[in-house]
Image (cartoon, helix red, strand yellow):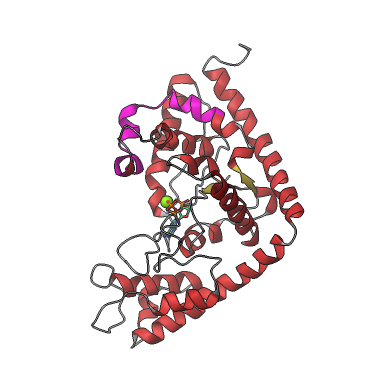
Amino acid sequence: MTSLSGITPSGRLTLGNYLGALSRFTDPDGFFFVANLHAMTTKHDPRRLATLTRECATLMLAAGIPPGAVFVQSDVPTHAQLAYLLECTSYVGELSRMIQYKEKGGRPMTRASLFTYPCLMAADILLYGAQRVPVGGDQDQHVELARDVAVRFNREYGDTFVVPELHKAALATRIKDLANPTAKMNKSDADDAVGTIRLLDPPDVIRRQIMRAVTDSDNEVRHDEAAKPGVTNLLEILAACTGGDPAQLALGYSSYGDLKRDVADAVLAVIEPLQKEYARLATDPGAIDGLLAQGRDRALAASEPRLQAAMRAMGLAGCA
Ligand code: ATP
Ligand code: MG
């Protein structure tokens, strides 16, 4: 069963990205990529994009993802090629219903790619025949669209694509912002946002952010998303970092201070080894280039046959 997932280099990676995505990319036969083409749907700075792409790829390798599985999306041209074919099988109606477009798009100066990127994401998934797409819960709508596009393509042009399953995360599907615990923690939030834990920030900064996390005033440690979003988020982070159950863990605490200290320890126990490995890898840029070239070649070889099959099915192959 092939699994596939990507991370957009739209900011510096967060604890949410690690718990919801990176830490779950364990399949040695999987494909895990830096989705840099997806980072251009709104105005972007080319230099920052290049820097963030490299940082994200290095973090993927540092997180222990099998090296041959890691690649940069723009290094593998089949993604953009299939995306166009899928744009030709998708409808304006379904793309207008995508949350990102509804939230950020619809204006004269909206980039056209903000409207069409779900087709690129469907291409990312369908090129590899991926059945499992291990992503956080915020991505469900995209995987649903990929499923719809695959079913429609197979019906109209003949059986070509594997229809992916929705594989929902059991835990840490939505780590919340520490300063605003009803909102998701996002890497594209401002670099200095106090509620966002960045994987490469100094440990003392991370500890301070956790100690200052917004809670509430009744000082009762309980897992209750609606009534106590801040405390619940801390319990979920603790559970995700230690492998426990958030409601059970709550029973062991009678003060917010103790809970926060343990959350900080648990988060740093996960992040510090990751930072050490990142620093080790970063000393040898040539070796990183080599690993990414290996990932690129493997991804190209794996995706090319399905692109060709889709082209043939649509009446394109052999026209050159
Ligand atoms: P952006 O602000 O650019 O949307 P993001 O932090 O949401 O950034 P994505 O690139 O959209 O990151 O998603 C990368 C992966 O990380 C996806 O699998 C997504 O589900 C997961 N992810 C993102 N944020 C969180 C979060 N707060 N909790 C758990 N998983 C998350
Ligand atoms: Mg996101």
Quarter location, residue 248: bottom left
* Residue 115 x, y percent position in the rendering: 38, 34
Residue 183 in sight here? yes
Identify the residue at image location x=59%, y=73%: 272
Point out residue 266 in the picture as x, y percentages from the top left corner.
50, 77
Which quarter of the picture shows residue 178?
bottom left
Q: Is residue 242 visible?
A: no
- Residue 90 in magenta stretch: yes
Picture quarter with the C terminus: top right
Q: Is residue 212 above or below residue 78?
A: below
Residue closer to the observer: 293 or 149: 293
Image-quadrant location for residue 170 = bottom left
Q: Is residue 124 left or right of residue 258?
A: right
- Closer-to-camera residue (295/111): 111
Q: Nearer the viewer, residue 221 or 50?
A: 50
* 91 inside magenta stretch: yes
- Position of 303 with respect to 151 (left or right) is right
Looking at the figure, which quarter contains the N terminus?
A: top right
* Percent of width and height locating residue 310: 55, 24
* Residue stretch rendered in magenta on the structure: 81-103
Residue shown at 40%/70% (left/top)? 236
Q: Is residue 258 above or below residue 70?
A: below
Q: Is residue 319 left or right of residue 18?
A: right
Principal SS element in the magenta part? helix
